[in-house]
Image: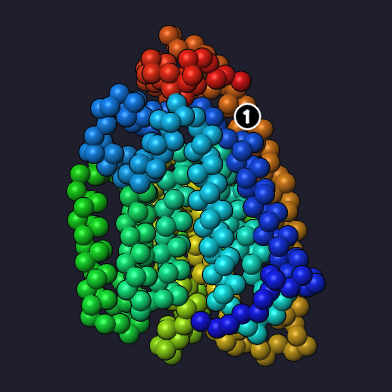
Amino acid sequence: MPMTKPFFADKISLPAWTAWLLVLLPALYYVAFSQSGALVHPFWDHAGDTSSLVASAHDGALTLSRIFQPHNEHRIAAPRLLLLGPALLSGWNLRWEFVLLNLFQTGQVAAVLFFLHRVLPANVGGWERTAILGAAAILGFSPAQHVNMWWSFMIELVMCCAYVLCAYVLLAQAARRWPSRILAAILLWFATYSFASGILAFLPVLLLVLFLRKTTWMERAFWIANATAAAALYFPGLPFTAQEHPGVIDLALYVLVFLGKPLGNLVWMYHIGMFGHASEYAINAVCGGVVCALAAAYFIHVLRKRERLAETRNGFFVLAVSYAVLVAGAVGYGRGALPGYGVAHAGVSPTTIVANIMYFGLLAACCDLQRALPFLTRLKGGFAARAGWAAAVLLLALSCTTYARAWAIVDEAQGLNRSLSKAYAVHDKSVPEDSSLYPSASEALAIKQRLHERRLGPYRGGGNDFH
């Protein structure tokens, strides 16, 4: 790995101070948004699935099969095990879940920033390095993923992405060290049992070790065994149902919108609100087309000289981009024909965190993009450099606007909290506010009674936690 300059240690460097600001301000925004907009009462799937799990653990009736029981197509055993301890110790105070949610999100972005700083060549100047690290932080803490910020149930997806990113960082940095391989495999198993997209994280590793990098037979056998075992244990027993799938053109468009939304939503978020989806997705589709074209150009550049795949940043690029594309395709195939959604489903907020992984891979490779796009070097008068800096400044300005506009979601989340408080305040009968708690009125009443009998959640401590 190339040596890097003591960038952040330089106390008098203006680029270093700027980088700190571009990293810390989005992180502080993320934590403030999450804590201010946090749903502190169980809601929908959280109220239905997790409340029964916590109640079973409280009664001493929780079984291992219940922990691994599927939730739709997901086996979320890792989040369930992680959250059970704080839930039982605190009487299921959801604030502790948001502490863990923030730790996982800030931790994964910090790991990416450290990796990018280490992997960028030493000759990448201060302002270029600042732009790359700032872009990673702005994307990583973007309010485009707002559902993962105000609903702690989505910690399962945040955990999955954190495990995948850390595993890929390990494999990219130390691909020939067995301790790193073993730890990476463990992380991918945790990802698999955090969210359904985790099972797909093995496929980019197989692509890299079987077809792209020179590896030993032991390494190939190790990853084949892990991927096979994960699939054999994960898929049996999942509740597969027949459903309509999108056509080839709609699927391709879905993938573009899915992969373009981290950038497109920074340029302009169509829908500012907790729920719903944007029926317009032109900007996201265009952004997806641009980033896919850049990724394809760089991938071709890397394949022209296979030894380039031995470089750390190129290994990470292949893993990160392949994973994001695979997830986009899989989700599009499964959800791209949902009634009332169609291609527009690709713009939903939670999976922005998955698409971000592709951008982290591109940022790792961006110092070599000029080699992949040689026409840039033929532009006269430094036009390419000036255009790049102008685009970066414009994107920063648009990102600030999006960050500011998205704060309205916090007010909406606080309103939902008040509605949930009114629902939980009456535990022995149904009230109109129960519709905000759970779609089924009878199930909403059962959830309230279940928690009230055990003094959990809003009823912890023998009193009422309504505000």
User: Can you tell which quarter of the image residue 59 is in?
Assistant: top left
Residue 190 in view of the camera: yes
- Tell me if residue 109 comes above or below residue 143 in the rendering: below
Q: Quadrant of the C terminus?
A: top right
Q: Residue at x 24, y 51 (%)?
A: 234
**Which one is in front, 416 or 348?**
416
Image spot of residue 197 (x, y percent): 37, 54
Secondary structure at numbered mark 1 = helix
- Tell me if residue 55 comes above or below residue 430 in the rendering: below
Residue 256 in view of the camera: no
**Which one is in front, 404 or 51?**
51
Q: Is residue 26 left or right of residue 422?
A: right
Q: How many marks are shown on the rendered structure? A: 1
- Tell me if residue 428 comes above or below residue 202 in the rendering: above
Image spot of residue 236 (x, y percent): 19, 48
**Which one is in front, 436 or 447?**
447
User: What colour scheme was applied to this rendering of the protein?
Assistant: rainbow
- Tell me if residue 382 comes above or below residue 128 in the rendering: below
Q: Is residue 351 left or right of residue 395?
A: left
Amino acid marked by disc 1? Gln
Residue at the extreme top:
428
Bin the neighbour count of mark 1 within 10 Å (Cα to Cα): few under 14, some 14-19, many 20 and up.
some
Q: Residue at x 53, y 16 (%)?
A: 464
Q: Residue at x 70, y 87 (%)?
A: 379
**Which one is in front, 122 or 309?**
122
Residue that mark 1 sits on: 414
Q: Residue at x 35, y 79 (%)?
A: 176
Image spot of residue 320 (x, y percent): 45, 67
Image spot of residue 186 (x, y percent): 33, 60
